[in-house]
């Protein structure tokens, strides 16, 4: 028996190079404001005279919007089309970053980050739908790993070139540069396969409900997102306040998180197979993430090496777990439900991102960074338990 033919859009240079590149960029720009909040935290706290919990509240503004929209955005993506949604993602991201760059008051900054919640909500449903409809099944694991690594490409860009531009020129110039690039990629979004149908009004009555796998992954994503968001938001500030790092060295931690996140997302996603399903990969990833969080907890006593080990470990294991969970969503969904199921799991992840940083900031104010890192370790451990129970019941 011969293998079924690849989808028409899965052939040629555009499908094999341009499409993955655009999907990767979409994931990068969807999360770039979060990483910029982390790398620019020392400058933002000084310029806007804000406290650490207020920094966490900025993250909550963005991911609160993303979590709320994710409850309905899947049906919108399914109705409007994946390419149109991806182009909108880049355009709104560019506008949000432009408002961020020109903010003159903390509340304007809150509004900018809240607007950035729109592309965050669009990211997984639109890009996963492109993969589900335009990429041959044999290539989906690799493409999902590559495109999910775009989130960490955003971390790298925020932690090195943009952070260095902020340090050498001005943080507003760095964010403004990112805004311009996002608008350029809105044009590049036209390289994605054309939407096969005209946009229509979203309807959901004829779509079957989400299966149990989606709900287990949603709960897992809340816990995973809480821990990852705390590291993204506070590790640079932790490095400057408790470890004596300079601004560039602290930003390099975020860049390192991005590099290992890229490698981890691609490598771990490629390990998933019929003999090694996503759940079998997620448990060890979460256990390793617990050890990485404990390294951050011990860094003030063990030195900068432990801080680097912790950050790189979070990227290689915790961040990679998000990519593997997205592969599980695509595998468990029908084409009609891919956008909706991706959005539901993303809602859990974004809820974690909304809750994790302010809770971490409050704990740090009361008990120091050690208390915060202990919470992160507990969140990763709980995520491992959720996956273990899910595997035992399915």
Image (spheres, grey):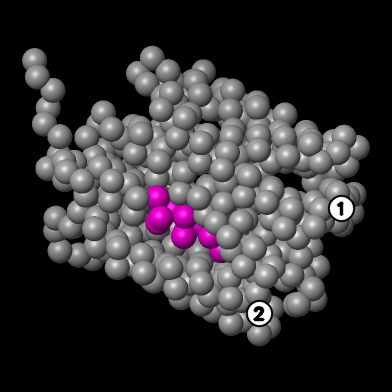
Q: From the viewer's perspective, tell me whether residue 3 is left or right of residue 129.
A: left
Q: Residue most toward the bottom?
A: 104
| First along the sequence among labels 1 and 2 | 2
Residue that appears at 51% across and 41% down: 262
Query: Within 10 Å of the Cα at label 2, are there few (<14), some (14-19), or many (20+) other Cα atoms?
Result: few
Query: How many angstroms separate mark 1 from mark 2 (CA)?
Result: 30 Å
Q: Nearer the viewer, residue 193 or 17?
A: 17
Is residue 29 located in the magenta-colored stretch of the structure? yes
- Above or below — where is 122 with respect to 368? below
Quadrant of residue 107 within the rendered picture: bottom right
Magenta span: chief secondary structure: helix
**Badge 1 is on which residue?**
244
Residue that appears at 85% across and 56% down: 241
Residue that appears at 91% across and 37% down: 301
Q: Nearer the viewer, residue 1 or 259?
A: 259
Q: Can residue 153 be seen in this view?
A: yes
Quadrant of residue 25 within the rendered picture: bottom left
The label number, if any, that marks residue 228 in the structure image: none
Q: What stretch is highlighted in magenta?
A: 24-34
- Above or below — where is 71 with respect to 385? below
Q: Nearer the viewer, residue 211 or 114?
A: 114
Q: Nearer the viewer, residue 242 or 386?
A: 242
Counting from the top left corner in percent of width and height, residue 14 is at: 21, 49
Secondary structure beneath label 2: helix
- Above or below — where is 110 with respect to 220? below
**Badge 2 is on which residue?**
107
Labelled pair 1, 2 in contact (Cβ < 8 Å): no
- Above or below — where is 173 with respect to 148? below
Counting from the top left corner in percent of width and height, residue 180 is at: 44, 73
């Amino acid at each position: 028996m011969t293998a079924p033919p690849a989808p028409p859009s899965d052939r040629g240079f555009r499908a094999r190079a341009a499409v993955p590149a655009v999907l990767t960029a979409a994931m990068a720009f969807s999360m770039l404001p979060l990483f910029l909040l982390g790398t620019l935290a020392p400058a933002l706290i000084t310029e806007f005279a804000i406290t650490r919990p207020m920094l966490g509240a900025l993250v909550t503004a963005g991911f609160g919007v993303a979590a709320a929209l994710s409850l309905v955005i899947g049906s919108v993506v399914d109705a409007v089309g994946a390419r149109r949604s991806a182009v909108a993602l880049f355009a709104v991201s560019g506008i949000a970053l432009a408002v961020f760059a020109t903010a003159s008051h903390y509340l304007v900054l809150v509004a900018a980050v809240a607007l950035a919640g729109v592309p965050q909500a669009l990211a997984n449903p639109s890009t996963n739908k492109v993969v589900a409809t335009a990429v041959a099944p044999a290539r989906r694991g690799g493409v999902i790993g590559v495109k999910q690594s775009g989130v960490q490409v955003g971390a790298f860009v925020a932690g090195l070139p943009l952070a260095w531009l902020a340090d050498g020129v001005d943080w507003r110039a760095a964010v403004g540069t990112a805004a311009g690039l996002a608008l350029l990629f809105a044009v590049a979004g036209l390289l994605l396969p054309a939407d096969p149908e005209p946009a229509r009004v979203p309807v959901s009555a004829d779509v079957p409900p989400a299966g149990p796998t989606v709900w287990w992954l949603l709960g897992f994503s809340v816990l995973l997102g809480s821990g990852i968001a705390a590291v993204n938001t506070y590790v640079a500030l932790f490095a400057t306040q408790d470890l004596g790092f300079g601004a560039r060295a602290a930003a390099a931690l975020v860049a390192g998180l991005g590099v290992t996140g890229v490698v981890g997302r691609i490598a771990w996603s490629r390990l998933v197979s019929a003999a090694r399903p996503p759940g079998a990969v997620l448990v060890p990833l979460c256990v390793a993430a617990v050890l990485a969080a404990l390294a951050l907890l011990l860094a003030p006593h063990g030195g900068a090496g432990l801080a680097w080990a912790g950050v790189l470990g979070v990227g290689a294991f915790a961040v990679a777990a998000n990519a593997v969970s997205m592969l599980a969503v695509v595998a468990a969904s029908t084409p009609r439900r891919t956008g909706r199921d991706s959005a539901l799991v993303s809602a859990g992840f974004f809820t974690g991102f909304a809750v994790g940083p302010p809770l971490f900031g409050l704990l740090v104010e009361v008990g120091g960074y050690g208390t915060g890192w202990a919470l992160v370790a507990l969140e990763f451990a709980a995520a491992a338990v959720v996956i273990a129970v899910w595997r035992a019941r399915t």
